[in-house]
Image: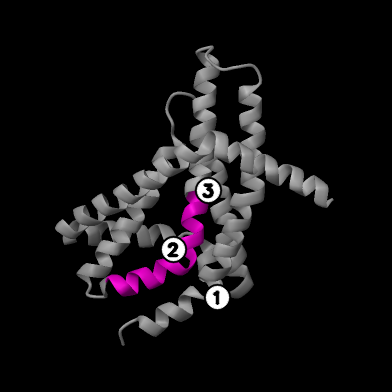
Amino acid sequence: MKTYFMTHWNGAETYFEKNLKSTYYFCLAFFGIMIILNTLLFLNDPGLSQSYFKELQSLFNQKEFLNSTGVELWFGIFFNNVIASGISILLGMIPFLFLPMFSLASNAIVIGLIGAVYQTNGFGWFVFLVGILPHGIIEIPALILGVTLGVNICFKLVKAILKRSIKGELKQAFIGCLRIYVLWVIPLFFVAAFIETFLTPILFNVVLPA
């Protein structure tokens, strides 16, 4: 069993190093830039940010698992992230459009919006970071990795359609991405959801102004 696991783990590492590393860092840079730009945009128009924030709250209120607590909330967050990331990867199977990047952009917009609202409401950057970083430091890399897998699959499909891929390249991409999703992305979301459920609220309440 250990040998079987290590075979797939090493396969995931090898595929990431050879095929995904540069794409991952590109997606990371894109995500960071989008957060900064959207934060500045919403800070420049508090009325717009408050309006969008109310819509965001309405969307969150529709997710029933967010009204739960404890283990139920933990697994609700976990499965929500796993499904969202899986959909992002599947979108990569639509060639030429690179749709997973839109998923990454939408998450950056949400973070930028929340950050701007915290500033305009007087909470400050520190409270915002405490509310997002404890779990975000794990969840965000997992999110970006999932998008990277989708982008990679899309790229390999485009190469195959244009007959510029080598034999077995697309199959190798599917196997490599599946390994990384199962062995890396899902466990990272599991840990991040645990922290978001049990640790982040405690830290957030400590620093939240009375």
Query: Three-letter amino acid code at disc 2?
Result: Asn
Q: Where is residue 16, by image quadrant?
A: top right
Q: What separation in Å lies between label 1 and label 2 (alpha carbons)?
A: 20 Å
Asked if residue 210 is positioned above or below residue 112 in the image, the reply reads: below
- Residue 4: percent from left, percent from top: 81, 45
Residue that badge 2 annotates: 61
Identify the disc placed on residue 158: none
Q: Where is residue 27, by image quadrant?
A: top left
Q: Which residues are magenta?
A: 125-143
Given this view, does label 1 or label 3 mark the residue nearer the observer?
A: 1
Residue that badge 1 annotates: 198
- Give the camera-side residue of 11 and 80: 11
Residue that badge 3 annotates: 84
- Residue 77: percent from left, percent from top: 55, 61
Magenta stretch holds residue 100: no
Instruction: Report the magenta stretch's main SS.
Output: helix
Query: Three-letter amino acid code at disc 3?
Result: Ala
Name the residue at the bottom extreme. Answer: 210
Q: Secondary structure at mark 3?
A: helix
Residue at 20% x, 53% y: name it: 41
Label located before the other in sequence (1 or 2): 2
Q: Quadrant of the C terminus?
A: bottom left
Q: Secondary structure at mark 1?
A: helix
Left/right placement of residue 76 relative to residue 2 reads left
Query: Three-letter amino acid code at disc 1?
Result: Phe
Label located before the other in sequence (1 or 3): 3
Residue at 56% x, 39% y: name it: 17
Mark yes or no: residue 90 visible.
Answer: no
Asked if residue 195 is positioned above or below residue 162 in the image, the reply reads: below
